[in-house]
Amino acid sequence: MSFVYEKKGGFLRDVKEKGAGLIFIISAPSGTGKTTLIKRVMERVPGLRFSVSYTTRLPRSNENEGEDYHFVSHSTFQRMVERDEFLEWAEVLGNRYGTPRPDFKKLELEEVDLILDIDTQGAKKIMNEPFEPVSIYFLPPSWKVLRERLINRGDSLEMIKYRLSTARKDMEEAHGYPYVLVNDNIEEAIEKLGCIIVAERCRRLKSYTIKENRKQWEEKDG
Ligand code: 5GP
């Protein structure tokens, strides 16, 4: 692995600056503020890249092709499924969403971590994969706040009701996530998310460093 370098006789790596090819899954019921959280943490913690999913849903007025999603037709999506081009895909609120397969070697080489904004179905499918993704679930502060956020977003009453009922089912899946955070105060939530990312980078680094040190000790001891 290339992400550790030796300096002053020890192993060092600035985990605040660089990623290590890790995958971070972030899930939350819609209206929790997940998109803002992801954008803000990416501004704050270097070495993060957003995985742009493919979707059959139409773009919202503030969304850009290739930035928020790759917006594709049902037939294109189906072709991609058949060619096994997705790491995972799921149907959410009547539309299909899929994560393109990441190039893990390239991520590691470029020293970046990937952020996946995916729902609980998708997360479940890949949570136990050998690349050991780190999954984080965000809860809204309360039902009242979630309802207000959905209203302010301009969703129709029918859609709000639908999103609230699916949110209830979705939240039951939170127990499967090792990290659960509440997006009560946005600044605090970003801070905590950043801490988790840095901590996970340290954790991976730890096992590597121990292995490297052991190798050196063994070599020294003959
Ligand atoms: P929205 O339409 O509001 O952007 O997203 C609806 C839901 O789809 C969100 O919960 C979001 O996390 C999820 N989603 C977005 N991209 C993907 C993906 O590639 N795979 C899965 N499984 N879910 C996704």
Image (spheres, grey):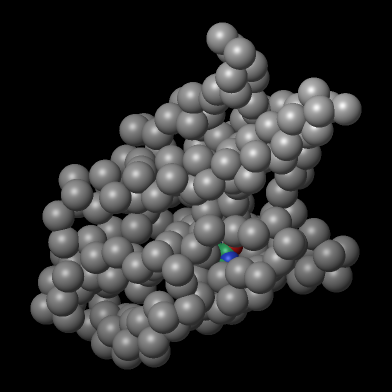
Residue 152 sits in quarter: bottom left
Q: Is residue 58 visible?
A: no
Residue 13 sits in quarter: top right
Q: Is residue 217 above or below residue 114?
A: above
Q: Is residue 2 visible?
A: yes
Residue plotted at (64% across, 59% down)? 132
Residue plotted at (59% across, 39% down)? 205
Which quadrant holds the C terminus? top right
Residue plotted at (43% across, 41% down)? 198
Is 105 situated left or right of 199 in this image? right
Figure label count? 0
Where in the figure is residue 22, as x and y percent of width and height? 60, 46
Residue plotted at (76% across, 27% down)? 216
Which quadrant holds the N terminus? top right
- Residue farthest to the front? 221
Is 216 situated left or right of 7 in this image? right
